[in-house]
Image (cartoon, grey):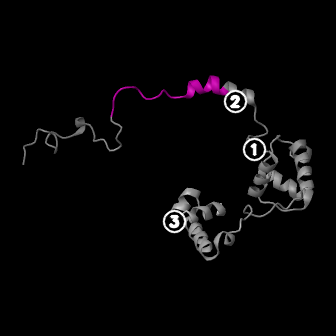
Amino acid sequence: MRMQAAELFEQEVGPTEVARRLRVSGKSAYQWHQLWRAGGVEALPPRGPGGSRCRLSPRCLEKLAAHLDQGPAAHGWAEDQVWTASRVATLIGRKFHVSYSVSGATRLMHGLGFTPQMPARRAAERDEQAVTVWTEVTWGEVEEPGRTATGGCASRTRPASRAGRPVDAPGDGGASPR
């Protein structure tokens, strides 16, 4: 990207326009412009990808992929077959003695072609058949009917009805004008 910036600077494109075209911050574009003016294209060496490098070797990554293919039950999570990022971070710590954050484990999983899943938070004692029967039978009896389709005021500050007002109340229409 810095090389593209250098080419644009050579075409006398300003740093603000370079930032817009390359979708970088204005600060970066101005720093690149200053370096380019001081030393030309050579002053803008290309940088590799940002962020920290992977703490697992390629061989360890292959082993991790094999562990993930075995499924969570093979590693002690028998309640469901879901690899969460938290579980993968724990697995990496157990197998490779390397600490990974949950977000780091997520990036690592994506790099290996896996996606973390969210477990269904349900009680182990849950009876799916009883839940289905309740929603189909009992809920229909308990549920209140929806609002009627008659027109009405949606305002929360709707004035009270005229029926409850005294005859000589302001706004009644029967009172004499001032």
Residue type for callout 2: Val
Image location of residue 85, percent across then percent down:
77, 51
Secondary structure type for disc 1: loop
**Residue at mark 3 to residue at mark 2: CA–CA distance:** 65 Å
Q: Quadrant of residue 32?
A: bottom right
Residue 14: assigned label: 3
Residue 131: assigned label: 2
What's drawn in magenta, residue-wise?
A: 134-152
Q: Nearer the viewer, residue 122 or 87?
A: 87
Q: Nearer the viewer, mark 1 or mark 2?
A: 1
Q: Would you place residue 78 above or below residue 146 in this image? A: below
Mark 1 or mark 2: which comes first in sequence? 1
Residue carrying label 1 = 117
**Residue at mark 3 to residue at mark 1: CA–CA distance:** 46 Å
Q: Nearer the viewer, mark 3 or mark 2?
A: 3
Going 47% across and 28% down the picture, which residue do you hit?
Answer: 146
